[in-house]
Image (cartoon, rainbow, N blue to C red):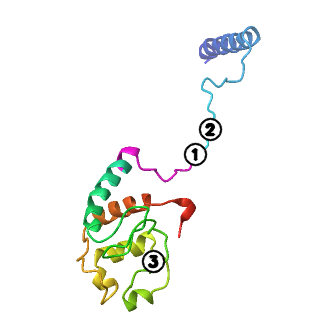
Amino acid sequence: MKKIFFAIFPSILVTAFAWTISNILIKPEEAKNIISVNPVPMKKEKAQEPPIQNISQEFSLGEKQAKKCKACHSLKKDKKIKIGPPLWSIVGAKKARTTNFKYSEKLQNLDGIWNEEELSKFIKAPNQYIPETKMLFKGIKNDEDRKNLIIFLKTLTDESNKN
């Protein structure tokens, strides 16, 4: 047993001595941050604005749809009355706004303005939106075609003379 004690004890002493000396010679420091992490605030996602290419494409597709309207409606700033009332500044305008045009009785009695939603409903099926309307056009059933037409109609405006 003495042999085991004299074998283990000196090795424990040597280890303790070496550990103490190493701590004196080499001072342990706190661990340093090697990687600095700066939290980046999360950006709130904005509604994506459509690319300019899409807007110009929608405009030109809407202009193409507007050719169907030109047969009966003026699209010019002069607001000339043809078979139907002029469409200049129609988006956001009061319904049945043209004083020199004889609207159907049901359309004359409609309140509100021609916002995008109302125009879309009317353009989709004029006779369903306003039964007995004078407008004989069957409508534009395709949602994209109507959307593009309304985008085009929104450009037909003179902001200073908005009705």
What residue range appears in magenta?
Answer: 44-54
For the residue pair 122 and 24, the one nearer the viewer reads as 122
137, above or below 56, in the image: below
Residues under labels 3 and 1: Cα distance? 51 Å
Q: Helix or strand or loop: what does disc 3 sit on?
A: loop
- Residue identifier under label 1: 42
Give coordinates of residue 69: x percent, y percent: 29, 68
Residues under labels 3 and 2: Cα distance? 59 Å
For the residue pair 61 and 31, the one nearer the viewer reads as 61
Q: Residues within 10 Å of mark 3 (few under 14, many from 20)?
A: some
**Residue shown at the point (34%, 77%) measured from the top left:** 122
In the rendered image, residue 122 lying in the magenta stretch gets the answer no
Give coordinates of residue 58: x percent, y percent: 33, 54
Q: Helix or strand or loop: what does disc 2 sit on?
A: loop
- Residue identifier under label 3: 98
Label 3 or label 2, whichever lies nearer to me, is 3
Disc assigned to residue 32: none
Seen in the image, is 152 located left or right of residue 44? left
Instruction: Name the residue type under label 1.
Output: Met
**Residue shown at the point (67%, 10%) measured from the top left:** 14
Seen in the image, is 52 located left or right of residue 162? left
Q: Helix or strand or loop: what does disc 1 sit on?
A: loop
- Residue identifier under label 2: 39
Residue 87: quarter of image: bottom left
Give coordinates of residue 118: x percent, y percent: 41, 75
